[in-house]
Amino acid sequence: MTTLVRLNLASNSFSGSVPARFGNLTQLRTLFLENNRFTGSLPGLEELNELAQFNVSYNMLNGSVPKKLQAFGEDSFLGNALCGKPLGICPWDDGGGENGANGTSNPSGVGGNVIDGERKKKGKLSGGAIAGIVVGSVVVLLLVVFALILLCRSGNKTRIAAAAVSGGGGGGGDKKLVFFGNSVKVFDLEDLLRASAEVLGKGTFGTTYKAVLEDGPVVAVKRLKDVTVSEKEFKEKIDVVGVMDHENLVPLRAYYYSREEKLLVHDYLPMGSLSAILHGNKGAGRIPLNWEMRSGIALGAARGIEYLHSQGPSVSHGNIKSSNILLTKSYDARVSDFGLAHLVGPSSTPNRVAGYRAPEVTDPRRVSQKADVYSFGVLLLELLTGKAPTHALLNEEGVDLPRWVQSVVREEWSSEVFDIELLRYHNSEEEMVQLLQLAVDCAVPYPDNRPSMSQVRQRIEELRGSSGMKEDAQDQIQQLDSINDIYHASSR
Ligand SMILES: Nc1ncnc2c1ncn2[C@@H]1O[C@H](COP(=O)(O)OP(=O)(O)OP(=O)(O)O)[C@@H](O)[C@H]1O
């Protein structure tokens, strides 16, 4: 039978699948199977190299035309559910029946067993498809590597520009940066939005960026979130902030207000915040803050807050904490973020903010001057102990500083209170104890028992002025005792 050259079974009622054994008829030149009821897919017939005439039209075949048979015309396959060259493209293929390359086809046919079709698609990819996938994968990989290199080089560089501000975003296009007082207008909104920016951190009121303007200054830009007040009220309140002018405040240079976006532009202080310096880098290369620096920072911050309070009895900072005490290169303190607590809605209070909050404060938008004094007292405790304050109930790391100091002082472990980095300054122990007492005075639970910021500033000036006076250990113990007494009195 292998020498058979012509097989014509056309126009019978043959059914079942086309026998794969036809593939053994290697001398076959003619194979006519049309007008039968053959079902299933066509076998590959790989060995039929001599085949010149072929017809399977008007059967019930399905699947793709094997590659070996694709040279025959359309007429050879009509009246079936076959696909691929020379018929239409198979739905599971994009290359004209390439599935049949190895003599296989979809056995279940078009619209038949989809899972099987999928299996074949996955298992029998053409050379072109494989090459495409390889090239595509390499290109994607290169792009990812390139993007990673760019990311590493630029740190967390970004742009402040939001669609809303850049013009088309509905109502922002005609708005401008509003500058305060003597601030030189060396840049405009476009410059600001074009500037390369770096996220400094996310706070209670929004995200703060460091923006480096082309041929201009470096500024800190805060994108406010949850601003609840109207534009009129915002302008009134921010105007009050804008006119504040003191060497211990971070000046507000400009603001931008649109429906979608509210930006505040401050001077950028490269040394960062007291919080970062106290609690940030604990490893090698860390510059420890000595006593002189710490008491100087306490004094600078106290002067800044005293100035704010001097603007009127209802003027308070509202958010005193160590990340809002920024430092110059000579470690002078600059108080930032004043007046913002009155602009934004009562959002969830982060743990680190709650640790500074006076017990009587229920609405973070209404913080009295005495509540500022409480927060400043916690800040002093932070400076002295080196510990980050958090609220006792929310405590994850850090401590409820007033309570902790109270418990330590009660046990009379005086030196335990102070930051280990301060313990080497033996000559300043008395000043440290005095500052500790002041901190405790500020953080008493009853607002009326707290000193004013003027008194606080004065006491810091005095204790710094008394440097190197007496070193009487007995005195220090007495002072610790008096702190103890204050706590006992305040908790009664
Ligand atoms: N003008 C500035 N110069 C340098 N660093 C700044 C400046 N303003 C803010 N930062 C730093 O950017 C970070 C984010 O500040 P941001 O004020 O947004 O949040 P926060 O101080 O942590 O919290 P909050 O919003 O409650 O004040 C902080 O580490 C802060 O010290």
Image (cartoon, rainbow, N blue to C red):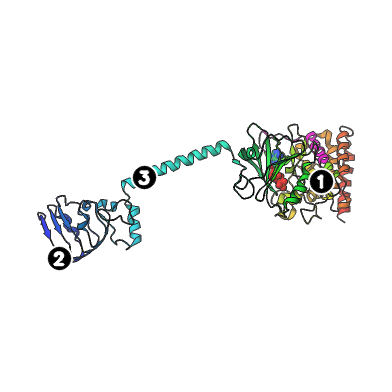
Q: Which residue is mark 2?
A: 11
Instruction: Reply yes or no: does residue 301 show up in magenta.
Output: yes
Residue at the outermost bottom position: 13
Instruction: Reply yes or no: does residue 333 show up in magenta.
Output: no
Q: Is residue 423 visible?
A: no
Question: Is disc 2 placed on a helix, strand or loop?
Answer: loop
Instruction: Say what amino acid the circle numbered 2 marks.
Output: Ser
Q: Residue at x 48, y 39 (%)?
A: 145
Q: Which residue is mark 3?
A: 132
Residue 322, x across and y down, in percent: 74, 43
Observer-side mark, 2 or 3, equals: 2
Describe residue 303's horizontal placement relative to residue 262 as left or right: right
Q: Which residue is mark 1?
A: 377
Q: What is the distance, in whole Å, between disc 1 and disc 3 at their CAs?
A: 67 Å
Quadrant housing residue 131: top left
Mark 1 sits near ligand 1, with its Cβ under 8 Å away = no
Main secondary structure along the magenta-highlighted residues: helix
Count of numbered tags: 3
Find the magenta span and give its range. Answer: 282-304
Relative to the observer, which residue lies in front, 69 or 124? 69
Describe residue 350's horizontal placement relative to residue 1 as left or right: right
Question: Is disc 1 placed on a helix, strand or loop?
Answer: helix
Pointer 1 or 3: first along the chain: 3
Badge 3: few (under 14), some or many (20 or more) residues near its Cα, within 10 Å? Answer: few
- Looking at the figure, which quarter contains the N terminus? bottom left
Residue 405, x across and y down, in percent: 80, 47
